[in-house]
Image: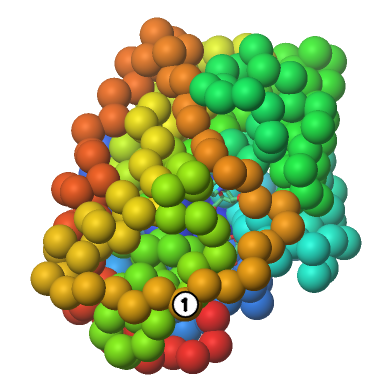
Amino acid sequence: MTVLVTGVAGFIGSNLAEYLLEKGETVVGIDNFSPYYAKKLKQHNLTTIPKSKNFIFIEVDLTETNAMQTKVFKKYKIDAIVNLAGWAGVTECHKQPLTYVYNNTFGVVNLLELAKDFGIYKFLQAGTSSQYGDLPIPWNEETQTTTPPQIYAASKASAELFGYSYYRNYGINFTAMRFFNVYGPRQRPEMALPMLFKSHLLKRPFPQYQDLNKTGRDYTYVKDICDGIYKITQKELGYQQINLGNGNPQTLQDLISATEKVIGAKIDLKRMEERIGEAEVTYCDNTKAKKLIGFNPEYDINSGVKEQYEWFIAQPDWYTLEKY
Ligand SMILES: NC(=O)c1ccc[n+]([C@@H]2O[C@H](COP(=O)([O-])OP(=O)(O)OC[C@H]3O[C@@H](n4cnc5c(N)ncnc54)[C@H](O)[C@@H]3O)[C@@H](O)[C@H]2O)c1
């Protein structure tokens, strides 16, 4: 199968490309090196994907219809699209809302149009647990996501609605994958774990935005996420929303303790003002994913943090580059 992976130079995209190649699939990966964080880190991600004739990288912006046609769809016969390209981040989105809407909503419709025109009937879309916002936990897919707590979640929720139109009218199998707090090697540098590692390595305090014991995140290791995505590419599921999350939330204190155990040192904290748009707790009910695709997350917080730290300390760019 040839899979188009958008956002392939990013965190989840580069991990997914590797995972699919290991499974024997061909990957056409695209990315525009958006300025959300340093291009150097994304270029590095690409260089670590094993060289293979089954991996093709194309620098292109998914919102540019003509370029997508000529550089991608007219050149390669694509069987499935995994759309990970987009602008992530529940706090950054308040600074540039239009960029989020343009890339995360217009970009998806552009890609759906191309899928329709080029006869591609499998479309997997990256959604987010943020769509559930402040609703009572745990969250399953029946939970209505009509009250997104920020522009980022709203952009992802609307992408799902467009997906439904293309399923209904053109028969495109559309799965909205709602990811929960993904972590692991190549994680975006502004996220908590890279910041914790960086605090330790650069000997400076960790900016603590939330309550240590009230805040919970359903941290899900990137390999488990990639396995879930792979399993969805192997099926024709019609129109679905599927939670991909560990199902076992940890407090911020738990995350810090797991990190301190791995690095063998205490981390200094600096209490910051809370930021708008963040949920207090994220909690995945992954029953549907288990039933429908055999999703089976294998990593717990201790094994995941250990693997990520071992990777991190071997990547000086990750902690010496100031500009994210
Ligand atoms: N990491 C998480 O915990 C998490 C949780 C929920 C949802 N998601 C979603 O998963 C996807 C991947 O997240 P990530 O953490 O790997 O982020 P990332 O920023 O590392 O990767 C996204 C990639 O998309 C590329 N991109 C952005 N706009 C583009 C465009 N117009 N054309 C081509 N490429 C473009 C970026 O350059 C980047 O490399 C995102 O859609 C994000 O919203 C991530």
Ligand 1's quadrant is bottom right
Quarter of the image for the C terminus: give it. Answer: bottom right
Quadrant in the rendering for residue 158: top right
Q: Is there any visible trace of residue 211 in the rendered image?
A: yes
Q: Residue shown at 65%/12% (left/top)?
A: 142
> Is residue 315 toward the left or the right of residue 2 in the image?
left
Residue type, numbered disc 1? Lys
Quadrant in the rendering for residue 289: top left
Which residue is tagged 1? 270
Rendered location of residue 197, percent (x, y) = 31, 73
Q: Residue shown at 66%/55% (left/top)?
A: 90
Is the image coloured rainbow, by chain, by secondary structure, or in one colour? rainbow
Quarter of the image for the N terminus: give it. Answer: top left
> Is residue 291 toward the left or the right of residue 238 in the image?
left
Q: Is residue 5 above or below residue 240?
A: below
Q: Residue shown at 68%/62% (left/top)?
A: 275
SS state under label 1: strand
Q: Is there any visible trace of residue 230 in the rendered image?
A: no
Rendered location of residue 162, percent (x, y) = 82, 30
Dot 1 crowding, Cα within 10 Å, few <14, some 14–19, many 20+: few
Q: Is residue 136 above or below residue 79?
A: above
